[in-house]
Image (cartoon, rainbow, N blue to C red):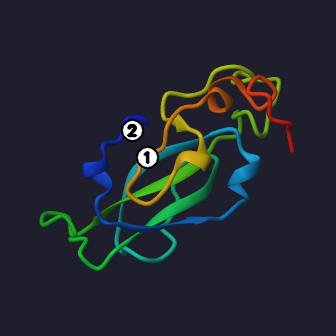
Amino acid sequence: MSSLLAESDLVHEAGVVWLENHERLDYVRQALDKTKRRDTTPPYARDGRMVGFALLDVGAAPDPDSGLYRRRVFFLLSHDRDSLPDGLYREGAPGEAVDPRTIAPGKPGTKTPRSQRGSAAAGTPAP
């Protein structure tokens, strides 16, 4: 899914849980996944690793057809900049990538110079 999530997709987010130190990451990929629960660690079934996820508030209702909740997950793939700094995304970033420092409950996150060109280009020392 695109990084261009609408705030209306995230209305029931109560919090964001980071599984890794997101301050060290130039970008994270974000997507909406369907899960059985609204407030536990969601299962992760794609390549790479999950680095965070959203918790939903008690007002969040599951989809009437599937019974599943739509929740945001944050992840990275093995060829992303954090693992391969001189790889494909040495400059630039995947379409669904946003700067993790701009993510908050109910806020989609945005692209920044750091997420698009890396910490060196943004004038921020690499960790």
Q: Position of residue 56 (x, y in %)?
A: 36, 70
Residue 47 appears in the figure? no
Name which of mark 1 and mark 2 comes first in the sequence.
2
Q: Helix, strand, or loop for circle 2?
A: loop
Total count of labels: 2
Badges 1 and 2: C-beta atoms under 8 Å apart? yes
Question: Quadrant location of residue 20?
Answer: bottom right
Q: Helix, strand, or loop for circle 1?
A: strand
Q: Split into 4 quadrants, where in the image is the N terminus?
A: top left
Q: From the viewer's perspective, tell me whether residue 110 is left or right of residue 125.
A: left
- Look at the picture and state if 65 lies above or below 117: below
Amino acid on which the number 2 mark rests in the picture: Met
Q: From the viewer's perspective, tell me whether residue 21 is left or right of residue 47.
A: right
Q: Residue at x 64, y 21 (%)?
A: 92
Q: Residue at x 79, y 39 (%)?
A: 83
Q: Position of residue 108 (x, y in %)?
A: 42, 46
- Look at the picture and state if 106 lies above or below 83: below
- Look at the picture and state if 46 lies above or below 116: below
Q: Mark 1, residues whose alpha carbon is within 10 Å: few (<14), some, or many (≥20)?
A: some
Residue 95 appears in the figure? yes
Q: Residue at x 72, y 51 (%)?
A: 23
Q: Position of residue 74 (x, y in %)?
A: 54, 51
Q: Mark 2, residues whose alpha carbon is within 10 Å: few (<14), some, or many (≥20)?
A: few
Question: Quadrant location of residue 120?
Answer: top right
Q: Position of residue 70 (x, y in %)?
A: 31, 59
Residue 61 disc label: none
Residue 1 disc label: 2
CA separation, marks 1 and 2? 5 Å
Residue 31 disc label: 1
